[in-house]
Amino acid sequence: MDNLCHLYMFDVIYEKPLRVDALQNLETLTYISIYDWTYEASSVEKMSRLHKLGVEEVDEKSDVCKLFASLAKLMSFRHFTLRGFRFRSMSCLDEIGVLNGLKKLRLDGRLARLPIANKYLVVLVLVNTCLNENPMPELHCLEQLKQRNVYTGPEMVIRYGFPDLRVLRINELWNLRNILVEGAMSRTFTKQKHVACL
């Protein structure tokens, strides 16, 4: 398996944690439990080709800071998915900002609040985060934003921002009754890009 480039997994139970750092040619790895990922901090750098990673079973007990710090050493790393649980919150994700090269981020699972946005991020996908506060003020620099069951409030206000937004998809916001747009997303509407809404 030394030459393996792409490893796609789902609901795999291991007898022993997978030594991912032994797979040095890996470019894609999805989905591995955060509890099955073992590595020596110094040996993660050997996975220099890894650019896409999906980690699941992230909850409030997960040591995501250690995970983010190790991934920050990977120069090719661009696409990251964190999958938690529908009824348990993920731990604080603010340290995700150390992933400077990250272009696409997918957060799937309950969050107490959004992490501080990475200024280099182009695409953000939020699924089942069930946020209590309107997430839009934190996301104004994105080009693509996709939301599904992300917010539990009745009104979403989008003010002054999103100058580069080209794609906005909003689905499954069951409590949402009103979307108010004020001085934002001019590029999205003037160029008639795809806007999927309720």
Image (tube, rainbow, N blue to C red):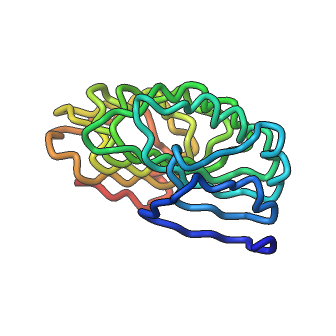
Return the x and y of residue 37 as percentages of the image width and height: 60, 48
Return the x and y of residue 94 as percentages of the image width and height: 55, 25
Q: Can the viewer see residue 94 in this picture?
A: yes
Q: Image quadrant for the N terminus? A: bottom right
Q: Is residue 164 above or below residue 111?
A: below
User: Splitting the image into 4 quarters, where does residue 163 fall?
Assistant: top right
User: Splitting the image into 4 quarters, where does residue 20 fall?
Assistant: bottom right
Q: Is residue 154 left or right of residue 90?
A: left
Q: Is residue 175 left or right of residue 128?
A: left
**Residue at the (62%, 42%) spot, across then down:** 121
**Residue at the (45%, 65%) spot, across then down:** 10
Q: Image quadrant for the C terminus? A: bottom left
Q: Give whichever of 125, 70 is nearer the camera.
A: 70
Q: Give whichever of 105, 27 is nearer the camera.
A: 27
Return the x and y of residue 182 as percentages of the image width and height: 36, 31
Count the labels in the image: 0
In the rendered image, the residue lying farthest to the front is 15
Q: Give whichever of 23, 52 is nearer the camera.
A: 23
Q: Is residue 170 above or below residue 70?
A: below
Q: Can the viewer see residue 123 in this picture?
A: no
**Residue at the (23%, 52%) spot, across then down:** 172
Q: Is residue 5 left or right of residue 59?
A: right
Return the x and y of residue 97 as percentages of the image width and height: 64, 30
Q: Is residue 129 above or below residue 17?
A: above
